[in-house]
Image (cartoon, helix red, strand yellow):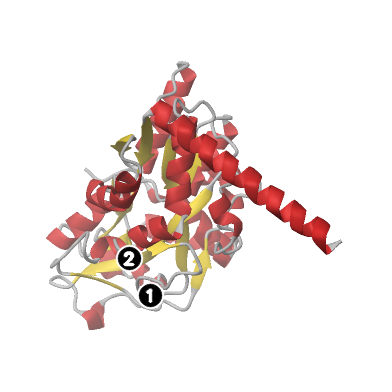
Amino acid sequence: MKCGLALVAIFGVAICANAVADTLEDAKREGEVVWYTSMNVSDADAVLKPFRERRPFLEISFVRATSDRIRNHILSDAADGRSTWDVVAFRVFDVAALIRQGLVAQYRSAETAAGFPPGSVDAEGRWAAIFSHEYVIGYNTRLVKAADAPKSWQDLLAPRWAGRFALDEGDVEWYAAMLDYWGRDKGAAFMRALGQQKPHRVRGHQALARQLGAGQFPLALVYSSDIEPPRLANAPAQSVKNLDPVIMAPTAVAISNTAPHPAAARLLVDYLLSKEGQQAIRSRNRAAVRSDLEPAKARSSPHIHPLNPRLAENFAEYEAEFRRVLGKRQP
């Protein structure tokens, strides 16, 4: 029996090795991979550097835009019968929108066999998380003293912050996760009250962080890493600590169901999920997902609430509520 099991294991390893070799040869013939990502250009370049060195035969083209724009671009192209992307990395809610249209391939990377916590890999193999964002309240330290900064989400409802708070116009996942954490009645009541504060709405989290640092508003709902080096070095911005909750939302990677370069796409996804790729992501002060790596930084709060990917099933409902309750972008 032990001999038989050993033979099965050997054959399994051999099959896996052959599959990897075939993928590598196919990728060499393809010669290119196209990556759509919401990651900023400097971070994407740094993350890709080890991959480029390891796979010099691949030309890597990446298109950088906000998650909303990437999603809309892919859906528009698909409606017109076009498909130019191989790999996408953006919010898991947006990946879900592509899945609903049948645009995402199933690929179970061997890298996810260990080291990934529950909920970070789709059960059907359509996506896997590569890093996560913390949603926090950021404040401009030249406009707000630490003692005067909000200490809770409810503090944003104080009259002094009316018209002085900003958020990204696409923060539907934060809205949905807050309702999930608090319950619909409490969560919806808070969101209605926040909408009455007339928050500014900005397109793009990095633009939002830069405007906060420049003093265009004293408070904003930001990704914690966006107001820290290397993305916002030497800017007068801090995040509020120990909020309850802090929503932790994943950025997920997926492969196109009609990828022009499917083998090269698998190589890139394997790298992003590998220890080497996750270390490169962590080096940019992003919260890499692998549990077998030390975190780049301490969590901003003990009250972390991970976004439940299943909330994406009701994305259209949450998006309509978000836009209705939190109003239009300020002129």
Q: Is residue 6 left or right of residue 47?
A: right
Position of residue 98 in the picture relative to residue 325 (left or right): right
| Pointer 2 residue | 224
- Crowd rating for badge 1 (residues with CA inside 10 Å; few <14, some 14–19, many 20+): some
Point out residue 187 in the picture as x, y percentages from the top left corner: 52, 62
Farthest-out residue, top: 80
Residue for point 58% across, 45% down: 17
Q: What mark, if any, has residue 300 been given in the picture?
A: 1
How far across and down, in percent of the image, does residue 29 sit?
Answer: 42, 26
Tag 2: amino acid:
Ser
Q: Does residue 107 appear in this view?
A: no
Q: Give the distance between the C-alpha atoms of the residues marked 2 and 1, in whole angstroms.
A: 8 Å
Residue at 31 percent across and 52 percent down: it is 50
Q: Which of marks 1 and 2 precedes in the sequence?
A: 2
Q: Considering the numbered disc 2 on the image, is that residue within a helix, a strand or a loop? A: helix
Pointer 2 local density, CA inside 10 Å: few below 14, some 14–19, many at least 20: many
Residue at far bottom of view: 147
* Label 1: which secondary element: loop
Front residue of 204/327: it is 204
The image position of residue 89, as x and y in percent, is: 42, 44
Q: Nearer the viewer, residue 56 or 84?
A: 56
**Disc 2 to disc 1: CB gap under 8 Å:** yes
Three-letter amino acid code at the position of disc 1: Ser
| Residue for point 35% across, 70% down | 296
Q: Is residue 127 above or below residue 248?
A: above
Mark yes or no: residue 186 visible. Answer: yes
Q: Locate residue 203 relative to residue 299 in the image: left or right.
A: left
Question: Which residue appears at 52% of the width and 46% of the height?
Answer: 318
